[in-house]
Image (cartoon, rainbow, N blue to C red):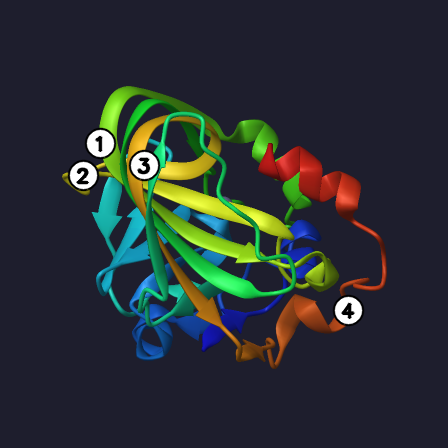
């Protein structure tokens, strides 16, 4: 099962207040990605450990009290595994949700993190103008994320959304670009998708009927 808090479009519109403690999120998965209250950094969960990658690029262990406004997690169990060689593409299972884990060697990874936002919140496309970008060269580490189908537009990020953490679990970020030397990929295909929406706050009045594709592209690339 894939468990999600809120929607990507709510995040794009600046709904950054945390609504679920990480201690609760942990009961829904040991693997995943997201962000934190006030958009404070990138979330990455791997092997049951939750990390907060702040604007210094460092991956900090997360305490249970901190909350999330948007996250997607699952209990990772590989359904398919395969070796990826240089410039290989991850095959796409068009209509399915799946978690993606790649342990690999990368000649290049470009990642980012975003600073905590103050109210009134800017929309995400504007908030990312203050992001920090990190470039890793010849680094070993793990890609953690999801591939979601085109039809979830507005709810999650269609296609791949990946975060990165180094092999010693000390640094990483939201992946903007990468070049892989080789990697061991594992896919966890999930047929159940559970979404929990905020029960109060800015979510109630966000204009979620809009097409925010352009904003999403600005934010992801
Ligand atoms: Zn991300």
How many C-alpha atoms fall within 10 Å of the one at disc 2: few (<14), some, or many (≥20)?
some
Asked if marks 2 and 1 touch (Cβ < 8 Å), the reply is yes
- Give the percent coordinates (x, y) of residue 99: 43, 60
Q: Looking at the picture, does residue 96 appear above or below residue 136?
A: below
Q: CA distance from mark 1 to mark 4?
A: 43 Å
Q: Earlier in the sequence, mark 4 or mark 2?
A: 2
* Nearest to viewer (mark 1 / mark 3): 1
Q: Earlier in the sequence, mark 1 or mark 4?
A: 1
Q: Which residue is mark 1?
A: 140
Asked if marks 1 and 3 touch (Cβ < 8 Å), the reply is no
Left or right placement of residue 172 versus residue 152 in this view: left
Residue drawn at 65 percent across, 63 percent down: 95
Q: Is mark 1 within 8 Å of ligand 1?
A: no
Q: Is mark 3 within 8 Å of ligand 1?
A: no
Q: CA distance from mark 2 to mark 1?
A: 5 Å
Left or right placement of residue 89 versus residue 154 in this view: left
- Circle 3 SS class: strand
- Circle 1 SS class: strand
Checking the image for residue 205, the label placed there is 4
Q: Which residue is mark 3?
A: 172
Residue drawn at 69 percent across, 37 percent down: 217
* Nearest to viewer (mark 3 / mark 2): 2
Q: CA distance from mark 3 to mark 4?
A: 33 Å
């Amino acid at each position: 099962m894939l468990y999600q808090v809120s929607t990507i479009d709510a995040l794009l519109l600046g709904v950054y207040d945390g609504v679920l403690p990480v201690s609760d999120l942990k009961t829904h998965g040991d693997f995943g990605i997201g962000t934190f209250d006030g958009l404070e950094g990138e979330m990455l969960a791997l092997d049951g450990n939750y990390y907060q990658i702040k604007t210094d690029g460092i991956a900090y262990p997360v305490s249970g009290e901190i909350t999330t406004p948007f996250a997607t997690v699952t209990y990772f169990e590989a359904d398919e595994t395969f070796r990826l060689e240089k410039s290989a593409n991850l095959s796409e299972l068009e209509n399915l949700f799946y978690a993606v884990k790649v342990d690999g060697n990368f000649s290049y990874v470009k990642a980012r993190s975003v600073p905590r936002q103050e109210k009134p919140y800017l929309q995400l496309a504007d908030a990312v103008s203050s992001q920090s970008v990190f470039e890793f060269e010849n680094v070993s580490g793990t890609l953690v994320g999801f591939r979601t189908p085109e039809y979830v537009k507005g709810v999650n990020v269609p296609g791949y959304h990946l975060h990165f953490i180094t092999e010693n679990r000390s640094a990483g970020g939201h992946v903007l670009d990468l070049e892989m030397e080789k990697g061991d990929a594992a896919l966890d295909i999930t047929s159940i998708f559970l979404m929990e929406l905020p029960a109060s706050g800015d979510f109630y009045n966000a204009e979620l009927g809009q097409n925010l594709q352009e904003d999403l592209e600005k934010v992801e690339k």
